[in-house]
Image (cartoon, helix red, strand yellow):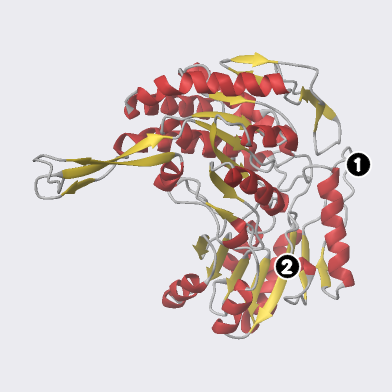
Amino acid sequence: MKAQPKASHYINGSFVDDERGKAIPVIYPATGETIATVYSATENVVELAIEAAREAQPAWARLKPVERGRILRRAADILRARNDELARLETLDTGKAIQETLVADPASAADALEYFGGAVASYNGDYVDFGGPFAYTRREALGVCVGIGAWNYPIQGAGWKSAPALAMGNAMVFKPSENTPLSALALAEIYTEAGLPNGLFNVVQGYGDVGAALASHPIVAKVSLTGSVPTGRKVLGLAGSLMKHATMELGGKSPLIIFDDADVENAVGGAMLANFYSTGQVCSNGTRVFVQNGLHDRFLDRLTERTKAIRIGDPLDPETQMGPLINRAQHEKVLSYIDIGKQEGATLHHGGAEPSLQGFESGFYVEPTIFTGVTDGMRIAREEIFGPVLSVLKFDAEDEVIARANDTEFGLSAGVFTRDLPRAHRVIAELQAGTCWINHYNLAPVEIPFGGFKQSGIGRENSLAALDHYSQLKSVYVETGDVVSPY
């Protein structure tokens, strides 16, 4: 099974390679086999990409917003037309089940391009009347922006970052995760086919050193990272020391609160989406599932029954519901946390083992796992695992669960299931999280902002808020009379 791209990088409208860079093997997580090899960007490749972006950006920013948007909307149409082949590429790159990638990956990128392509034409500054004199504000492009993507949603991340950046008149140099380098190259080709001028979306591969070189480059005006909290701290510190704009979309240990009066089937479905979708590799996952005492046993029974029915197997089989983890290191990390949970005294209620799958013996599979008897101080309740590990915690009262839910350094997401809508709004208002759901979990439509509080990030992706973060504000005062001066 091969998925070798034409070259490692995409710069100024063409594929580029430099095999002097460190080799990056692309591993298919279901089998452990190498399906492609790309090369990390050398210093010369980084300079070529940034220079191409610098040269192309001013003319792009001078276009009418509707003209920029027209190109993004054409690219969205191409993404949708090629959804099946791009979904297959994303499954090979990530190991996620193709039934997921067909609906959640290229489609989400297309949604972002379509939304920002249309929204930017009516995204304007303000007018302030001073009774004769007046002022207005302008939203202007930042210049060259850097996007650093995560491996769990590669083409979605490339779309979420590039769409508002390009719509606003910026150029972007995008570095995918070294674990998933393929689909950003496909997006770059699609942008060119849609009519995007050369140099405005460049893709360079690499490890952390390449990300640091991009983030610290003097020409770069902004860095947008999706990744872990430790990586975010490093990149934000670097960007801040150089007075660059930054958006950080980081990790979490989010609470999902289920009250006694919740619909059991919906609550179970929400909890499974919050823990098992994409094999649990979602930053916003609600991995601390707080269940009120009166519903706990019924909820757990139905959760167990439905979890046992999850079909694990070949990610390219449309019937498969759960694929492998991304790589061996993540596989070992998740298994180690399952051991930690048992050692700390939590009850391994279901799963926790490596499934035996014929033909996929070398794949990075872990069973969907449920822990019960979990307490707030346990590491499995405090640290981000990033795998299909669900912790069930009991609670008695509303005030109690709010305090426990907020007792974390993270603040990305939160969810509440209840039929009592006044209580739902009341609890959500008290939860320290940037992206929340009532009676659902993990939906992320492009029309609403996505991002976190506390250590889970800074800035927002999606919605008009993203255009704010990819622009700078200029104020202009206009005098219509004479200048009054004491001199």
Identity, as a three-letter code, of the amino acid under mark 2? Arg
Residue 412: % across, % down:
58, 59
* Quadrant for the C terminus in the image: top left
Residue occupying image coordinates x 64% and y 37%: 154
Q: Which of the pair 263/485 is nearer the observer?
A: 485
For disc 2, the marked residue is 382
Q: Residue furthest front?
A: 487
Q: Is residue 125 left or right of residue 320?
A: left
Q: Quadrant of residue 68?
A: top left
Report the front residue among 140 and 318: 140
Give the percent coordinates (x, y) of residue 130. 14, 50
Q: Secondary structure at mark 1?
A: loop
In the foreground, 164 or 292 = 164
Please give the name of the residue rendered at 67% of the width and 38% of the height, measured from the top-left corner: 98
Q: Is residue 262 visible?
A: yes
Disc 2 vs disc 1: Cβ atoms closer than 8 Å? no
Residue ID for mark 1: 361
